[in-house]
Image (cartoon, rainbow, N blue to C red):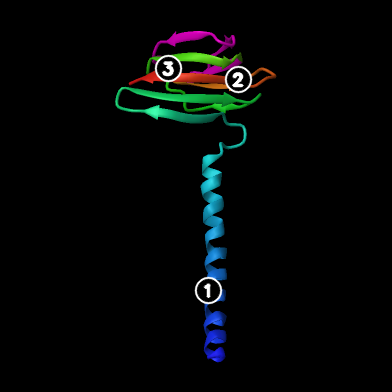
């Protein structure tokens, strides 16, 4: 009986170790997908349906957002204000100042652009995109 238990344990324990080692890289990849790339703004989707998309964007100094929904009208509220620079696809730039608590209706743009935090503090925006 003891011989069978030893045999069983000697086969099962290494199998669990191998499975654990194989699963570790997959878990690390999932965590990496959740975190924004270095230098990129953190976008957190709060709600979405066929009419609106609601999300928050957090910029650390120097962070960029390359996924601006510029072709849709949106309402933006600055939870924490600061200075952003828009860079349009044609190379033109525009500085945009946000004051904490400020709310703006932003019309859809024909020219796509990215935004970058050019200030020295974090910026936190709450965005409601109208689909």
* Marks 2/3: CA–CA distance: 23 Å
Across and down, in percent, residue 56 comes to: 50, 24
Decide whether residue 126 is among the magenta residues.
Answer: no
Report the magenta residues as a range. 83-110
Residue at 56% x, 89% y is 2
Residue assigned mark 1: 15
Query: Which circle's residue, 2 or 1, is located before the other in the chain?
Result: 1
- How far apart in space, not on screen, are marks 3 and 1 (Cα)? 56 Å
- Which of discs 2 and 3 lies nearer the camera? The answer is 2
Looking at marks 2 and 3 on the same chain, the residue that comes earlier in the sequence is marked by: 3
Q: Quadrant of the C terminus?
A: top left
Q: Is residue 27 visible?
A: yes
The residues tagged by marks 2 and 1 sit, at their Cα atoms, a distance apart of 48 Å
In primary-sequence order, the first of circles 3 and 1 is 1
Residue under numbered circle 3: 111
Secondary element type, mark 2: strand
Mark 2 nearby-residue class (10 Å; few <14, some 14–19, many ≥20):
many
Element assignment for label 1: helix
Against 33, is 125 above or below? above
Mark carried by residue 123: 2
């Amino acid at each position: 009986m003891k011989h069978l238990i030893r045999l069983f344990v000697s086969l099962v324990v290494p199998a669990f170790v191998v499975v654990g080692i194989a699963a570790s890289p997959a878990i690390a990849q999932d965590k990496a997908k959740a975190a924004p790339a270095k230098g990129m703004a953190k976008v957190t989707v709060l709600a979405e349906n066929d009419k609106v998309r609601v999300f928050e964007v957090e910029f650390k100094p120097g962070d960029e957002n390359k996924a601006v929904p510029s072709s849709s009208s949106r309402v933006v509220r600055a939870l924490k204000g600061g200075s952003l620079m828009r860079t349009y696809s044609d190379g033109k730039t525009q500085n945009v100042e946000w004051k904490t608590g400020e709310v703006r209706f932003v019309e859809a743009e024909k020219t796509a652009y990215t935004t970058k935090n050019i200030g020295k503090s974090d910026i936190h925006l709450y965005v409601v995109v109208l689909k």
